[in-house]
Amino acid sequence: MTRIQLDMPEEQVKELDELMKETNIATRKELFNNALTLFQWAVNAKRSGRIVASLDEQTGTAKEILMPVLENARAKSFSTKAS
């Protein structure tokens, strides 16, 4: 088992705690595990050439999430396939 320790500004800690309350997550470890699962899903989707987006069910409109790290995963995937 590896221990990971993070130093964060108090404001970010408050945001994490609010997310935990809103989603009924009991521990920061559980929050981290859920965040990691979502991030892995998004990276895998980008590697597959997919767009990661949020869909408004009422209007059918979608908004793509734009994160440089996801674009990095997509670019790396394409460069690996080209090699």
Image: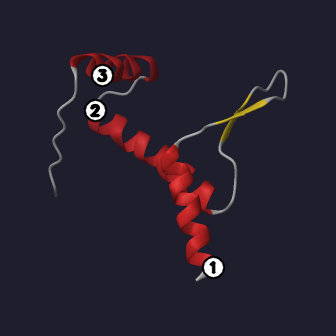
Residue 14 against residue 50 in the figure, above or below: above
* Foreground of the two, 57 or 79: 79
Give the residue at x 57% y 62%.
75
Residue 16 against residue 71 in the figure, above or below: above
Residue at the right extreme? 59
Crowd band around label 2 with a 10 angstrom C-alpha radius: few (<14), some (14–19), many (20+): few
Question: As shown in the figure, which amino acid type bears the numbered disc 1?
Answer: Ala
- Nearer the observer: mark 2 or 1; the answer is 1
Give the residue at x 40% y 21%.
19
- Measure the C-alpha gap from mark 2 to mark 1: 40 Å
* Foreground of the two, 20 or 7: 7
Question: As shown in the figure, which amino acid type bears the numbered disc 3?
Answer: Gln
Question: As shown in the figure, which amino acid type bears the numbered disc 2?
Answer: Arg
How many marks can you see? 3
* Foreground of the two, 37 or 7: 7
Q: Which residue is mark 3?
A: 12
- Nearer the observer: mark 1 or 3; the answer is 1
Dot 2: what SS? helix
Report whether 55 appears left or right of 52: right
- Picture quadrant of residue 77: bottom right
Q: Which residue is mark 2?
A: 28
Report whether 70 appears left or right of 14: right
- Residue 53 location (% of width, % of height): 67, 38
- Which of disc 3 and disc 1 is earlier in sequence? 3
